[in-house]
């Protein structure tokens, strides 16, 4: 399965972890922008082209300026799902610059996919699907669980117990820590974001 980076218009990859993850992708789709330094092969630029001034070949640009009901990230995800349905999508430059864009982008990705990773300058969000999942984690490190849908989750082992915890608000299962174990078992009823700061990766 190919790994395709979708690069939004937020803060470009800065940390070694971000740049390494970006370089490991097989190609990239950019949201109305040129790829940042170190990005893999450009597959397509998608958006309404209100920000981009370039002389790239038309075959690399999908201009969707007639569609003003969705943002460029939505357009890029839909293009990837239509043209690369088997690819695993990973996100960069989704956060930073504006908090309203950050929150909207996280919500959009949550609604569009069930499993992905979003890299940021401070860490990463893992979106995991509903069901039971086991993740490898760094021992004794910060971790947060965030759901954009009401649900009940269980996470073991963590310092502050998360046992059949009902989440109705975004903050409810944040700011926890892993134990000295390296495997984390999760059970959730809907997709769930797991956030790990950069020093916890």
Image: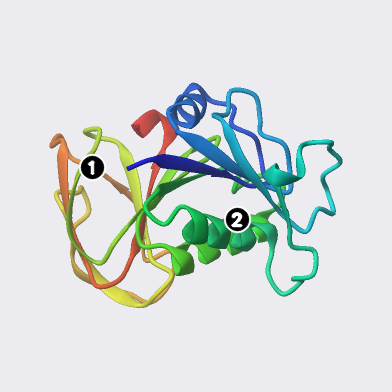
Q: Is residue 53 above or below residue 115?
A: above
Give coordinates of residue 190: x percent, y percent.
Answer: 30, 71
Q: Is residue 130 above or below residue 49?
A: below
Residue 99 appears in which quarter of the rendering?
Answer: bottom right
Residue 193 is left or right of residue 15, and the answer is left
Residue 4 is left or right of residue 94, and the answer is left
Give coordinates of residue 90: x percent, y percent.
Answer: 45, 45
Q: Secondary structure at mark 2?
A: helix
Q: Secondary structure at mark 1?
A: loop
Give coordinates of residue 65: x percent, y percent.
Answer: 80, 64
Query: What residue does disc 2 label?
Result: 76
Query: What residue does disc 1 label?
Result: 178
Q: Residue at x 46, y 24 (%)?
A: 20
Mark closer to the observer (2, 1): 2
The answer to the question of whether label 2 and label 1 lie on touching residues, with beta carbons closer than 8 A, is no
Q: Residue at x 29, y 62 (%)?
A: 129
Could you say which is closer to the camera, residue 8 or residue 166? 8
């Amino acid at each position: 399965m190919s790994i395709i980076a979708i690069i939004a218009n937020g803060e470009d990859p800065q940390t070694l972890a971000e740049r390494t993850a970006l370089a490991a992708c097989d190609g990239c789709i950019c949201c109305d922008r040129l790829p940042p330094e170190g990005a893999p092969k450009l597959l397509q630029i998608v958006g309404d082209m209100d920000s981009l001034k370039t002389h790239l070949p038309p075959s690399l640009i999908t201009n969707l300026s007639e569609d003003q009901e969705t943002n460029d990230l939505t357009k890029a995800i839909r293009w990837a799902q239509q043209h690369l349905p088997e690819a695993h999508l990973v996100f960069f430059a989704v956060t930073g610059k504006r908090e309203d864009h950050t929150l909207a982008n996280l919500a959009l990705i949550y609604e569009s996919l069930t499993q992905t990773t979003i890299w940021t300058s401070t860490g990463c969000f893992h979106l995991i699907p509903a069901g039971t999942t086991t993740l490898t984690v760094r021992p004794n490190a910060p971790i947060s669980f965030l759901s954009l849908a009401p649900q009940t989750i269980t996470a073991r082992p963590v310092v502050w117990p998360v046992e059949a915890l009902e989440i109705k608000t975004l903050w409810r299962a944040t700011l926890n820590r892993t134990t000295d174990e390296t495997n984390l078992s999760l059970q959730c009823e809907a997709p769930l974001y797991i956030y790990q700061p950069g020093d916890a990766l």
